Image: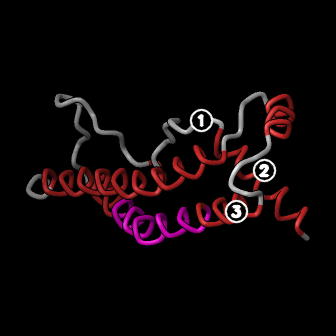
């Protein structure tokens, strides 16, 4: 059972350590903040789409950081099982297998940082979407 837990943690760590700074696309096909002269036309369909995106983002904001926190806790628990850090020979073997180094301390820190960043990004997107509703309020 301990081997399964270790393997799970290592797999998760490898997946999360690939690119900590990668920018993921916004969920639910949300609009990117356009240039000032290229705002979308305010149609009923557009407003409905924006309202649906706000609802989806609110759900993500309510559950997303907690879910990421559970993943971070799993990583931290697995790291504690391994003594806090992988032995150098294991790190070298994994680096040869995956093509990148697996530093559990860095992965734990990035996970918690990502948890906070998720909330900030979602709040920014919700703010933009709400500003779109205000912009379109009197034009339909």
Instruction: Provide the residue designation for mark 1.
Output: 19
Q: Which residues are magenta?
A: 52-71
Instruction: Provide the residue designation for mark 3.
Output: 80
Look at the image and tell me in which quarter the N terminus lies: bottom right
Mark 1 and mark 3 lie on one chain; the one further toward the N terminus is: 1
State the SS at label 1.
loop
Label 2–label 1 contact, CB within 8 A:
no
Specify whether 83 is left or right of 18: right
x 38%, y 58%: residue: 119
x 34%, y 62%: residue: 54
Percent of width and height locating residue 36:
17, 31
Look at the image and tell me in which quarter the C terminus lies: bottom left
Specify whether 35 is left or right of 21: left
CA distance for labels 1 and 3: 23 Å
State the SS at label 2.
helix
Picture quadrant where residue 103 is located = top right
- State which mark lies toward you, 3 or 2: 3
56 is within the stretch colored magenta? yes
Specify whether 111 is left or right of 50: right
């Amino acid at each position: 059972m301990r081997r399964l837990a270790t393997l799970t943690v290592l797999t998760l760590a490898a997946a999360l350590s690939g690119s900590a700074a990668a920018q993921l696309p916004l969920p639910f096909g949300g609009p990117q903040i356009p240039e000032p002269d290229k705002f979308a036309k305010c149609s009923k369909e557009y407003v409905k789409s924006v309202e649906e995106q706000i609802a989806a983002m609110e759900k993500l904001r309510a559950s997303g950081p907690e879910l990421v926190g559970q993943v971070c806790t799993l990583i931290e628990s697995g790291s504690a099982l391994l003594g806090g850090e992988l032995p150098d020979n294991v790190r070298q073997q994994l680096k040869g297998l995956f093509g990148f180094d697996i530093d559990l301390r860095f992965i734990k820190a990035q996970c918690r940082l990502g948890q906070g960043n998720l909330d900030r990004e979602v709040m920014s997107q919700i703010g933009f979407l709400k500003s779109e509703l205000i912009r379109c309020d009197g034009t339909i």
